[in-house]
Amino acid sequence: MSPLSLALILILMSTAVAFVASRTKALSLVGGRVHELHSLPGHYGLYALVWCLLPALLVLAIWIAIGPAIVDGIIVDRLHEADPTIGADRLGLILNDVRNYVSGNLVSEDIDPALAKTGEAYRSLLLTGLWGTFVASVAVALAGAFFAFSRIRPDMRARNKVERVVWLIMVACSLVAVLVTVGIVLSLVFEAGRFFAKVSPLEFLFGLHWSPQMAMRADQVASEGSFGAVPLFAGTLLITFIAMLVAVPVGLLSAVYMTQYADHRVRSLAKPMLEILAGVPTVVYGFFAALVVAPWIRDTGGLLGLSVASESALAAGLVMGVMIIPFMSSLSDDALTAVPQSMRDGSYALGATRAETIRSVLIPAALPGIVGAFLLSVSRAIGETMIVVMAAGLAANLTANPLEAVTTVTVQIATLLVGDQEFDSAKTLAAFALGLVLFIVTLSLNVIALRVVRKYREQYD
Amino acid sequence: MSTEDAKLKFQTRGVHVFYGDKEAIKGVDLDIYNNEVTALIGPSGCGKSTYLRCLNRMNDTVDGAKVTGSILLDGTDIYDRKVDVVQLRARVGMVFQKPNPFPKSIFENIAYGPRIHGLASKKSEYDAIVETSLKKAGLWNEVSDRLDEPGTSLSGGQQQRLCIARAIAVSPEVILMDEPCSALDPIATARVEELIDELRENYAIVIVTHSMQQAARVSQKTAFFHLGEIVERGHTEQIFTNPREERTRDYITGRFG
Amino acid sequence: MTDTGQRNDWASDEMQRRIARRYAADSRFKWYGIGAILLAMGVLVLLLGSIIVTGIPGFTQTQVRLQVSFDPEQFGGSLKGKTPEEVDAAIAAADFSGMIRTGLQSIFPDVTQRRDVRDLTDLVSSGARQKLAQIVREDPGIVGSTVEVWLPTSDDVHTIVNGSMERDVAESDRRLNDKQIAWLETLEKTDSIRGTLSSDFFTGGDSREPEMAGVWGSVVGSFWTLLVTLAVAFPLGVLAAVYLEEFAPKNRWSDLIEVNINNLAAVPSIVFGLLGLAVYLNVMHLPRSAPIVGGLTLALMTMPVIIIAARAALKAVPPSIRAGAMGLGASKVQVTFHHVLPLAMPGILTGVIIGMAHALGETAPLLMIGMVAFIVDIPGGISDAATVLPVQIYLWADSPERAFVEKTSAAIMVLLTFLILMNAVAVLLRKRFERKW
């Protein structure tokens, strides 16, 4: 059993003891007359529980979060001391080997003695850290328990203190959402920064040639990586455009039909149908695109005498469009239902037909909501990964022909990062630069869309 | 044929309205005359608005609503299959409780009706319709210099007069008003009431109102609804000064409502 | 319209024609809507239909009947009374391929040339050896006897037998040569070929051989992953929602958090994968390919969904409940945790289940954190290397063997079944506890 699991068990046991002991102490202080206590007996138990459990867990969490990084840092310092000329790339490789050595994942029979030595040092540092954490966390738990136990008085405001902690925990939970955003931004910006140190941002954003196969060794020729991302952006836009050609009319018209024409029976059939369409995982759509749609388009194109790539942008775009139909439809549905009934009545009362009312009153009135739906759908299409990974190609063609294969930002992120990889090559870091672009674009679309939709809601509330 | 008969616009007999299983109107007989304002009064939920919405078949848009009985407009049953609901609504205009201008310019709000019915073809004709309608609704002087602004930019009272102008623009024969002043302040209410009195010259007007004073001020005939039936109908003066029914007297004097 | 009193002539021909045109436009418009719905419905039917049609053979395994003699020589004598370790050692040393070859040659005694023998044994799956090993492990006493066993055929035989590959095409266009087809037909004539429900598919892990590949490994991987997701996202999401809905002051801070959560819910899932890769793997050095990393990554993605659903459920609890409890002297925390939260729980759970169903179908972020490895073993915990159901589907869809197409479709059917079950539970929960205040 690892020291951390052992520590956790000990902490939980002492917490249980602290809870029961404190509750009993509170009760016995007033001779069992609960009303003489400021708070309920359980609150005193909880008070001790909080003091015993939370600080100790914090110690454990700190080690899990930064412990390995500290050990890495020490080892790197030592390697640096031993050989000051060592390069960052080389350091990374050694560190990887060392970690594999420690976890027993090193397959090779003959292990370099130097590596074994560093590995042992790494292992002992790690163990020291682990046991140090063990001692520290258990000590903190016990200290907390004794502290809380000794402070228990009948007039202590245990409930208020416990509630204060509950409040703090809730605040912390809601801050996690912010932390995630910060984490996304930091990790993307940091790794993308490393990429831009190797490849100029101008080349990345405006270069027309994408072939990320980086030379593994300096003497290797003819496979210089080039990182012009324009073909990726163009491919993403082409597929998104095709998807929108499907999703916007079909989604909008079905929303109009469902809110304005369909009776209860049709709605109760069509709504679940759209929900199923929305619930199908994207990997299934990707398989459908590759198995059914792409061959069908290729064969149809062949009959018409067109040459269609087996992984055409059209196939991926059409299927992505189908995936987005329910999204577009339900958001448009919301926008249309938010238009007050009085607006519709006003138009009908003038003798307008349903189609006239929809076209000249409802849709203009719901336009901001529909625009918001459109923007969110575009953002969805741009960020969609599995359909394009499975149905669009890897070839970075700069073309507007939907029958050719194109590649997208998400496809490249996925392919650059799947499989074994070194974390210092421009190839893998490029994925983070692409991720940063993707994040910025989708975030802007979302912010604008949510703002538009919110403004629009306020208008009718 | 007496003058009274010549002015007869709507003749309704035995009107029942069902919402699903619920009977909202239980056999209403009422006549509505040209050049008169007919006020429908009664406590909330008595069916007066429901009855009003039968007269231009607005109940058609409500799921599960069913109307029986005969409603004759100029002698033709409006629920007859041959009657076209779109035309009917052009002939019988309606103004709602809450002003509901479309999210369009003032000009387009008024031009909308004539446009869908094809009542004009040239820009100048639309200009003329918009101007006359706004003048009749007494709004022309207030908005003539900003016809391109959205209808929603007007004040509540102005919006309601815009909605009246919008209804007038398709030259209806009857105008139905469903508590047209309930969302307005007293000054705006007074303007609209004046307007109703002026419009009486050219249209038959039916107005649902909660305010007995308003009914007394603007109408010539009054019908008192209670629990889906008409308790009493007659000349407004008579209803308010000398009601025949006990329930009418109680309602008018404020004992219930 | 012009002067007062002038009426429009509704009965005029021109007006009647216009009305007819308007009604035609109206019904055209209606048919556009019906067309849109039918189109969506048609695609759904096509999608599910093609998956079911290709997927059903994926649940089956084609087997061949062989007489296999467990020659004691191969096991170093009888295994009776041996310890399990000795049995295992004997099994490891035994030549099961040879036993299969002998069994086949007893049916086709005239096949002697080396090439032909290899072609013949290729009819049987290479996984058949493990099957024999398992038979011996379960009953060591069988050594020394000859028994009739049904062994899985190779995927090429499977696709020919179930008809997803044509056998009447030129030899170069199929995976089996003419001789192999002839042998296969001989076997079919003697009823030595059968198709059965594949237990390997339901109980096995991944394999390079389509006929041996199973979904169980990835189902278990999905289970561990979702367990981690639930354990992290549920408390975090609910507590955050409670804070934002019940406690947070309405100021710029809570506005910021709210906007933040709404945006997070719309961030592409692959970006969460990048975050997981950068933080969990590169900074925290958690094990690659493990459910704990996958689960933590999906938790970040699911949390905003849970927060939004939980807030909606909390909002639906009427203020009178809060006022009532408050009036009895309960503290704000007590009001929330004793009254509001329990009342909102069904709604919250519905949202949680839907969020988890979403996480179950998610693939892209897991590719980033190495859950695409080829993993044969069934994962035993949250830190074992594992893959999940949708990633397994992706891996199989990428495999060149024809037989993996049907395995992919079959795995999709398994995934969809789980999704339908989860959504059904959510719907039931909503129906059961739906409450009108």
Image: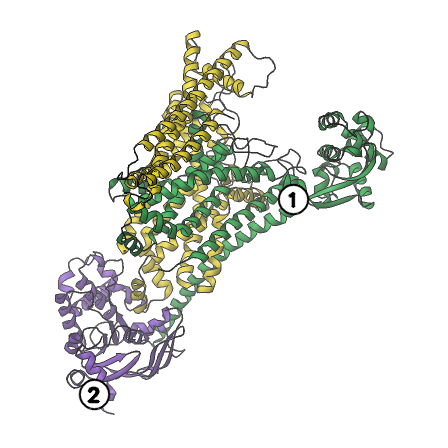
Chain colours: A yellow, B purple, C green
Give the amino acid type for the residue marked by disc 1 in the picture.
Gly
Where residue A62 sits: x, y (%)?
Answer: 38, 26
For this rendering, which residue is in front, A160 or A314?
A160
Residue at 70% over, 34% down:
C127
Image quadrant occupied by the C terminus of chain A? bottom left
Residue at 59% over, 37% down:
C217
Q: Classify mark 1: residues with Cα within 10 Å, few (<14), some (14-19) or many (20+).
A: many
Secondary structure category for the residue under label 2: loop
Give the amino acid type for the residue marked by disc 2 in the picture.
Arg
Q: Nearer the viewer, mark 1 or mark 2?
A: 2
**Residues under labels 1 and 2: Cα distance?**
85 Å
- Residue A62: tell me if it is visible: yes
- Chain letter of mark 2 equals B
Residue at 53% over, 28% down:
A419
> On the rendered structure, is C227 left or right of C266?
right
Residue C58: image tag: 1
For this rendering, which residue is in front, B248 or C140?
C140
Where residue C258 sits: x, y (%)?
Answer: 31, 43
Q: Is residue C113 above or below residue A254?
A: above
Q: Quadrant of residue B213?
A: bottom left
Secondary structure category for the residue under label 1: helix
- Residue A304: tell me if it is visible: no
Q: Is residue C409 above or below residue A436?
A: below
- Chain letter of mark 1 equals C
Q: Is residue C87 above or below residue C38?
A: above
| Residue named by callout 2 | B244
> On the rendered structure, is A448 left or right of B255?
right
Q: Is residue C379 above or below residue A101?
A: below
